[in-house]
Amino acid sequence: MLDRYSTQEMRHLWSPENQYASWLKVEMAALWAMEQQGIVPPGTYQELEAANLKPDPAAIEEIEAVTRHDVIAFLTHMEQQGGDVAKWLHFGMTSSDMLDTSLALRLVEALDLILEAAGRLADALAKQARTHVTTLMVGRTHGIHAEPTTLGLMFAGWYAEMQRSISRVQDARNQAAYGKISGAVGTYGHLSPEIERMALERLGLKPETVSTQVVPRDRHAQVLAALAMMAGSLERFAVNLRHMQRTEVSEAFEPFGSGQKGSSAMPHKRNPILLENITGLARTVRGYVMPALENMALWHERDISHSSVERVILPDATSLMQFALLRMSRVIEGLDISEDRLLENLWLTKGLVFSGTVLLALVRKGVPRTRAYEAVQRAGLATYRGAGTFRQMLEREQLVTELMDPEELDRLFDLGHHLRHAREIVDRALNEKHPLPQGDS
Amino acid sequence: MLDRYSTQEMRHLWSPENQYASWLKVEMAALWAMEQQGIVPPGTYQELEAANLKPDPAAIEEIEAVTRHDVIAFLTHMEQQGGDVAKWLHFGMTSSDMLDTSLALRLVEALDLILEAAGRLADALAKQARTHVTTLMVGRTHGIHAEPTTLGLMFAGWYAEMQRSISRVQDARNQAAYGKISGAVGTYGHLSPEIERMALERLGLKPETVSTQVVPRDRHAQVLAALAMMAGSLERFAVNLRHMQRTEVSEAFEPFGSGQKGSSAMPHKRNPILLENITGLARTVRGYVMPALENMALWHERDISHSSVERVILPDATSLMQFALLRMSRVIEGLDISEDRLLENLWLTKGLVFSGTVLLALVRKGVPRTRAYEAVQRAGLATYRGAGTFRQMLEREQLVTELMDPEELDRLFDLGHHLRHAREIVDRALNEKHPLPQGDS
Amino acid sequence: MLDRYSTQEMRHLWSPENQYASWLKVEMAALWAMEQQGIVPPGTYQELEAANLKPDPAAIEEIEAVTRHDVIAFLTHMEQQGGDVAKWLHFGMTSSDMLDTSLALRLVEALDLILEAAGRLADALAKQARTHVTTLMVGRTHGIHAEPTTLGLMFAGWYAEMQRSISRVQDARNQAAYGKISGAVGTYGHLSPEIERMALERLGLKPETVSTQVVPRDRHAQVLAALAMMAGSLERFAVNLRHMQRTEVSEAFEPFGSGQKGSSAMPHKRNPILLENITGLARTVRGYVMPALENMALWHERDISHSSVERVILPDATSLMQFALLRMSRVIEGLDISEDRLLENLWLTKGLVFSGTVLLALVRKGVPRTRAYEAVQRAGLATYRGAGTFRQMLEREQLVTELMDPEELDRLFDLGHHLRHAREIVDRALNEKHPLPQGDS
Amino acid sequence: MLDRYSTQEMRHLWSPENQYASWLKVEMAALWAMEQQGIVPPGTYQELEAANLKPDPAAIEEIEAVTRHDVIAFLTHMEQQGGDVAKWLHFGMTSSDMLDTSLALRLVEALDLILEAAGRLADALAKQARTHVTTLMVGRTHGIHAEPTTLGLMFAGWYAEMQRSISRVQDARNQAAYGKISGAVGTYGHLSPEIERMALERLGLKPETVSTQVVPRDRHAQVLAALAMMAGSLERFAVNLRHMQRTEVSEAFEPFGSGQKGSSAMPHKRNPILLENITGLARTVRGYVMPALENMALWHERDISHSSVERVILPDATSLMQFALLRMSRVIEGLDISEDRLLENLWLTKGLVFSGTVLLALVRKGVPRTRAYEAVQRAGLATYRGAGTFRQMLEREQLVTELMDPEELDRLFDLGHHLRHAREIVDRALNEKHPLPQGDS
């Protein structure tokens, strides 16, 4: 996890300190449940609470260098700190009872940080959608000017996509909130479903329906798949804002710090480096979905091949995702939009963006589509070649002038009519009730 | 789409014949809505219904060879068949209004076929779970014998994973059931949200919250991600059954046709070729998730780069998935299980699978974990080296004999006690209420 | 394999007809070698040649429906056609001896078709590089105008990248040109290395260094990796030409057929649909690299999981690649370049593209970098805001006017000087000796 | 980069300290070349050498926090240390001239570490191949016993695959050894090809054929593709050794430290955790190929989206790869092989592994293949069901006893004959001349 691309809170979350603290939390919850169920002597939990255990990563790693087993090293260290009573920690449990439960705790916490950042981005998009609901802009398909639209519609569409992304991450978070304390092969050979239920409830988790030695890895794959899709959404927004910041387009610019220097050789440049950075982060996050999917097919009651993968990709994917969301939030919030340039670009093709409207009007008047098409295309190409505005070129087409008088033509070029539904669409997007995340609750 | 790996119904679904039929269905629904809304002259819909249009792929492709635009070719062909009134087809629409809506129709249908096949597989797994709830089996971790479990638990775990896979595909199906008739850049410049709503409702689809020229591609990415996860589940089942069919294990065998020949050179071989085939199909389906994710970041109101990707991966991924599910259903239904061998393998390590139980019993008697661990490991390694059964080796350990009498040791080796929760877990898995797929309903 | 995205020759290459013809070719070569080595009775080869065997896919598939083994079905069919002597076909061989050798033959042929198409594209790029070696263009970094360059340099860079791509595919082709006739587990239990060597030499292939039942799959992974990289190059070219065709840029346009219709609703549009299509095809081809890489880890002397993957991805990846290369060749050959617009865009920022040059000139005169930077940035931002040309703004900077007279400033804005190395770079690229593909020869 | 999965030398290589040292090295080489070419005043290089510059990461990051541009921060820091003369550093250069050249230096160094580790692994495999050239083993296809082979052949096959992997990484290393000092858009606007050539030669690199602002990213994609394929080879070896260590197979075991504890609950277990770990690392490395391929399609003369990707994946992929290679080397070197068990398993199917040999012998005697096949399959299935050894079952087949006397049958079951080519194959693999890596030299 690079400092450059992560927040302090995410680095803490995935730190060894927090890992061992989380291990202890799980062991204590399990111990508590065992005491309730009479497996462990009364008073054990209280005594261990009082011992105020504080796992020390360095000490644990020293022991692990010998045992080559991290959980045994951790427990040995706890026995060193807590004395004899600490032997009840992990009683009847297998390493993965604790490890997978702890992983669920931290993964859920990481996803909650992501959801918080995603919520901030969604809010920023909603605000821009409202602000620019009627800000005129040319709609582009294939990179070519098509028909008029509004900037607010663009943001509303991104907002709606972001909401779907959030919904997927919420689903994945709920699917990841499962632990297991079911023993070496998931049979509760030494403990019981009741102990598992009580311990996990104390931790805010649910018991795995059928565990093996581990929680099945489709849950983790779903997390990475949801993050990959959220990354894809960020990439979409970033690529399009980069398009808008191109020199020839110049419709919107990412925020630019006052002391910031654009380029070592070209001091005037305002480069969309934050957005390019987000594009790259999205690519990186997306790549993690493949190893996560490959992790699913573990052998029998588990093999441990998934473990090294997860040590790398879970911290990296979640931290890069959160970082990219926060960066994108700041970009959207501080976006420098040139309404003048948006309008100028809309008229760049001298009215050609109304060609579809004219075509339809002719068809509505009974002209066969192919004939209408030819007339409009001819006027369009003339405009394209610089012979005048599209309106002027249409006036040279007999088919047009015979069927429409100037007032009629005026109405066809009316942007207000064209965009009469913009507010309705934006309202629909912003007011849409988002379904609660699916869960087993 | 290879005949070898697809069903007749899936091939039909993605055939040119059905594609054009689906296009016509969308155009007719839109026309109907337009007539209701007074955009198209009264009676148009009825007249076109009466014309009994039948799109002919060969004729359309001939026209497309000239126009290089498939929708225009289709409409030209329809005008040839339907005469003048056919000009109202596609009125005010952009190609993607029809294309994306038609794609949603067929994609939903394909996913329904997949869900049907997945349901069959889940049923087969449930049946095996019930049948084998107490069939003894050794649980393996790292490929090494660990503790006893039952075959029913294995199937119950796969059933639960399959249910999660199904739930993800259902979510994706619901997210794919969105169409759009909102014009060239999604502004309803020529038509209206009301027409879209009516037409899509007639087709069983919902209107896209905010469309551009197209439905946003995160919906399609979700479909491929859900299929990739389902493929991962199939791979898990296939890999594990292949392990069980290994010569040295021989616990279960995929069904083997009577006329089937195992190998051109080694006639006795029973190879798990169906399962290996499913493993490969899973790999192939999984690979499609990357292009689907990359499809999300379209430029502005759309670029058409996603189209060639989807022409390949949507038919291929859905057909391979359905085929693999059906093949796996047949394997699970006809699985040839050797209960004798399962039991034999359980005792292969001469009782070592109870070492954890013994360890715990010693700790429970107050022996420090490390001391208990050493005794059990010593007895274990002796057993491993062939000196006798684990029970016998334990009886050579003073620590054990001092603390436990033979009856106590007997109880530790009791499989009934070990697996006392098996039925409860299987019941929990099979009875679990699966949440309804999340949707916007 | 979609007709839409494949050539007739590639469809033939991967057709069942050609597959069985290739199988027969391998069997005959092996038989010939066996006869030379005295394994098969003298005259057998000649007799079978005379029998003029013609494998009929339909007949073979009928037999396979019963035996569920394609090679046995093929051999049975050959015995039906060739009579008793045909029993010597496949003598002592295992299915994979023939299958993998035949696959190598067809894969090499497919890669040769790709190399031919890639060569055509490289030629087209070289020609454009030469033609436009001095055609002025603005260089863009981050999508923002940077410094002047030439269109020829752009094409030369693509040519050089294409040559590297070609070199990788040639390497992969040579690594794929390996067969094996070494029996069920690669030990030549029934035949001999000498027979393999003779048969493969007759087929233009080399013997696998150490085969198992199959040729190791890293060779096939290398093919898909090389294609994925070539696809990435095509994507780069396509994305950049799409940028150049954007309405606001309009520097270059893909060829547009005379009868072609751009859009069903907007008849004037010239959309870069071929380039968008190539972008999508590149995405699709790239996705195949993951399953190919996963195919490598076969179990023991082989499992057959790779087979279904290869049946899908080898024909699809090679045919899509060839198609995309041919399409891109046509685009490059027929590219409609607007030199006027290229020049116009170069001056769009009113000389700001020389800011780096001015900065350096100041530093060279002894001005500290940060002071020089501030002056140039100030003049640059003023230009950016529309206060005049960059040259004019510089003349308002005391630092500049004190140190440079107008003639000196003129020289800084001299494009000829700026691009004095263009021809040298292009020559270097086009004349570069490309190393022969690495091989074991 | 996790300490857990990286070596100290690789962590140093990618550390900020070494990054800035490498930057300075590139700047100094460029400065030297500029001085030779008269761009920079005579004596500048010597003066800066004498200044003994030592970039301090903390100081640079402090400056970067304001400028948000790492190279400017670095240069500012160098001016602080070196005084006025340091202004000549980076003269006429663009950031990427230094960054990409420095990246090439460190990437080449990382790949050299990988090649060293890969060489060690190849040596270990060669040694095992030689040692076990005649160690009998059952060959398995589909996980099912097939025909006899030797353990040496297995290792020789892995050795040959490893050599191919090494050759690919060498190619990629040579393709990565390219730098560029060609200015903002690759035109040498301020410097010259000669300066670039001299500076890069001093650094052991070659000049990019046609650079833009950056070195084209297909070179880096090739590195990741080569590593992904090498990872695939490691996965193959790891998966197969895990198979061999399965309880039921027990043919080979990874080394097990004396103090090591196998499991927290099951002390007797010898789990192949190193091999499972390598399997997971291979998955992780493989996943990086997708972002690297997506990095290729940069916009125009460069966008910076690749940068964040590379900051993550280049250190991670190279460090994980080296670590996995070293771990696998130790496993192969210390592998605990049970020759007894290998032999025992070979006879597990009571001679069935000779069925192919018997089939062929019958055909050679003139029996039609299908009749021979039926007899052998019948005897085989009887053996499979436990009726006796395959030899015994064959003696019950009239077809066999009529055609072959006991001595003839004996010869068919002769392992020496079967494996007569083993030494030749192993020799061929170990002596094969590996082509020098392809390069542009």
Image (cartoon, coloured by chain):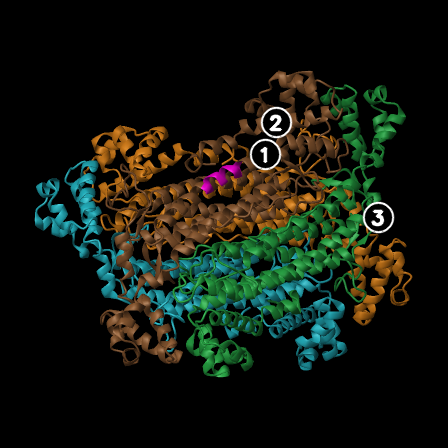
Chain colours: A orange, B cyan, C green, D brown
- In the rendered structure, the answer to whether residue A92 lies left or right of residue B22 reads left
**Front in this rendered view, residue D62 or B280:** B280
Most foreground residue, C232 or A340: C232
Q: Which residue bears the numbered disc 1?
A: D105
Q: Which amino acid is tagged 3?
A: Glu
Q: Residue C339 has which mark?
A: 3
Q: Quick check: A290 above or below C36?
A: above
Q: Considering only order in the chain, which callout, 1 or 2, is on the residue closer to the N terminus?
A: 2
In magenta segment, residue A115: no
Q: Position of residue C30 (x, y in %)?
A: 49, 69
D75 w.r.t. B387: above or below: above
Q: In which chain is the residue bearing label 2?
A: D
Label 3: chain? C
Sort mark 3 into few (<14), some (14-19) or many (20+) by Cα contacts within 10 Å. some
Q: Is residue D113 magenta?
A: yes
What segment is highlighted magenta in the picture?
D110-119
- Pointer 2 with pointer 3, Cβ within 8 A: no
Q: Which residue is mark 2?
A: D25
Q: Position of residue A148 (x, y in %)?
A: 75, 53
Residue D386, image x and y in percent? 23, 69
Give the label, 1 or 3, closer to the camera: 1
Tell me the chief SS of the magenta region.
Answer: helix
Taking the spot 48% from the left edge, 52% from the top edge, the residue there is: A436
Asked if one can make out residue A216 in the rendered structure from this viewpoint, the answer is: no
User: Could you say which quadrant of the image residue A376 lies in?
Assistant: bottom right
